[in-house]
Amino acid sequence: MTTSTTFHPPARLLLGPGPSNVEDRVLRAMSAQMVGYFDPSLVEVKSEITRLLRLAFGTLNAATFPLSGTGMAGMEAALINLLEAGDRAIIGVNGAFGDRMAQIVERCGATLIRIDAEWGRPIFPEQIEAALKKASGAKLFAVVHAETSTGVLQPLEGFRQVAERYQTTFVLDAVTSLAGHPVEVDRHGVDVCYSGTQKALSAPPGMAPITLSARAMELARGRKRKLQSFYFDVPLFAEYWETHQAYHHTPPITFYYALLEALRIVEEEGLEARFARHRLNHLALVAGLEALGLQMHVEAPYRLATLNTVKIPADVDDAKVRGRLLREFGIEIGGGLGVLKGKVWRIGLMGVNSRPNSVLLLLAALERILPNEGFSCGSGIAAANAVYAQG
Ligand SMILES: *Cc1c(COP(=O)(O)O)cnc(C)c1O
């Protein structure tokens, strides 16, 4: 047996719910040397990250930066900084990530008002409004823009008016939408929006970009009791980020390099072009899957481009198909979560992976594997090509 001192992970095409593959440019940026956390060169890196995050989030918010930690760090920080024991919070739950938010609300000692919708349907602003009518004075409401567990794109229209009418705070999870779908924080009146780096940004997991309105920062600063978590105290971290002076924690500098490079790639491509690319590859994938004879889980108007859920045909072995995709083609796709376990596959087309060769390779692989697993399928490639031909 030979021993190796370096890692040689297998080459994978990551078409699951995240992480997605990382741009080569981003990997190269990560190999750069460390600087200190007060180094003048880092001031520039940080301010570029802020400028580019504002662009991606569609906001002018002063408080816009990456928290150290994965997407869950963003979710946790967003909720714990706003909520205190005794507060009331309304959470729209139409999938596993809404359910996570609900769990965090309870861990804060706040009163949870849960609005459930089917896993595969969006939440409607009227449902939030009805809950606010009953629980007037609720501190916040939250929904998930891109429910990675179900493939639902949550429309954002109407929530702003509800938040304004009831003088409450709008929290949005944009982990799987940022840089793949328009988020438009300011236009939609979102007060706190967080994301992750390993999905449509195509950077490694490790950062949680977040943006907070002035009103949300005021709430976080004006708590009755100090936040129990030092690490996730957003106003404290903001002081380091903005003044470049106050030490809070040693920031993961390598990840700042990675995020900056990933955001530069977003800016070079242009947001509109990037959204259009995600949409085109999504449409081609859906056309191909349907031509294979498979059915999508979500109705067309609510489908995410970044995460596609397709029903597993009866009698087809979920784990076996996913195992063969990985072994024979190096392709990872996701299985179902929670109530959708064993019922759907989750196919991510995020960031660098949203491209025709991912779509066509996956369709070809499924076309080869499914008939062996008892599902006689049609041809998906021609249908996908027809979508590409129309552009
Ligand atoms: C992936 C994801 C998260 C959590 O991100 P991690 O990087 O896994 O911590 C939160 N919300 C949604 C919608 C996600 O898809």
Image (cartoon, rainbow, N blue to C red):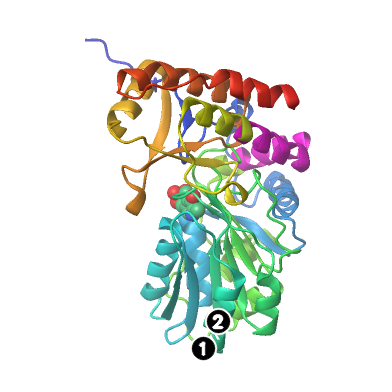
Within 10 Å of the Cα at label 2, are there few (<14), some (14-19), or many (20+) other Cα atoms? few
What label does residue 31 carry, if any?
none
**Residue 176: where, in percent of width, then height?**
55, 48
Position above or below: 309 against 228: above
Residue bounds of the magenta highlight: 257-282
Marks 2 and 1 in Cβ contact (< 8 Å):
yes
**Residue 40: where, in percent of width, then height?**
71, 48
* Residue 11 visible in the current orientation: no
Q: Residue furthest left?
A: 1
Helix, strand or loop status at disc 1: helix
> Disc 2 designates what residue?
130
> Disc 1 designates what residue?
134
Classify residue 123 as left or right of residue 215: left
Q: Amino acid at mark 1?
A: Lys
Q: State the separation of the CA atoms marked 2 and 1.
A: 7 Å
* Residue 332 visible in the current orientation: yes
Position above or below: 51 against 190: above
Name the image quarter holding residue 316: top left
**Residue 23: where, in percent of width, then height?**
60, 29
